[in-house]
Amino acid sequence: MMDERILIVEGITDKKQINKILKDPVEILCTHGTLGIERMEELILDYNLDHRPVFILVDEDYSGNKLRKQLSAELPHAEQIYIDKAFREVAATPEPELARVLLKHHFKIKPIYLI
């Protein structure tokens, strides 16, 4: 069964990287950068984001921070997940590090990444 939670990321490479280390299927939504107001409203309605546990995991750069602010304003209940600023991009974050960060937010991780 699909997890109720939804994880919002910026790009497809982020999604692939995260899917690789997650043990259970979680719905991952790609924004492909910042969102216009209409697109944001569409996503909220299409994915029922106001009534689901939402997690935001974006790059630690200018566009990622801009997107994080935008998503936080629209989804005040969303939980923020941060990667180490040293890696800048979710896709560039080493898998064990990404696994550790996701584990902290109670996502189930494949044991191989928890070394």
Image: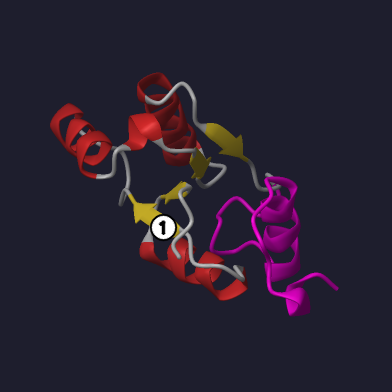
| Residue 114 lies in quadrant | bottom right
Q: Report the side of 46 relative to 69 (left or right).
A: left
Q: Residue 8: percent from the left, percent from the top?
A: 43, 47
Q: Residue at x 56, y 68 (%)?
A: 24
Q: Amino acid at mark 1?
A: Glu
Q: Residue 29: percent from the left, percent from the top?
A: 36, 53
Q: Residue at x 42, y 39 (%)?
A: 63
Indicate the secondary structure of the residue bearing disc 1. Answer: strand
Few, some or many residues within 10 Å of mark 1 (<14, 14–19, 20+):
some
Front residue of 57 and 85: 57
Which residue is under mark 1?
27
Q: Quadrant of the N terminus?
A: bottom left
Q: Which residues are magenta?
A: 86-115
Q: How is colour applied across the structure in the image? A: secondary structure
Q: Is residue 106 magenta?
A: yes
Q: Report the side of 12 relative to 84 (left or right).
A: left
Q: Report the side of 106 relative to 61 (left or right).
A: right
Q: Residue furthest left?
A: 38
Q: Quadrant of the C terminus?
A: bottom right
Q: Residue furthest right?
A: 115
Q: Please count the marks in the image.
A: 1
Q: Is residue 27 magenta?
A: no
Q: Residue at x 37, y 26 (%)?
A: 70
Q: Residue 31: percent from the left, percent from the top?
A: 32, 48
**Relative to 13, does residue 86 appear above or below in the rendering?**
above
Q: Report the side of 106 relative to 50 (left or right).
A: right
Q: Residue furthest bottom?
A: 112
Front residue of 71 and 27: 27
Q: Residue 85: percent from the left, percent from the top?
A: 68, 44
Q: Residue at x 45, y 49 (%)?
A: 4
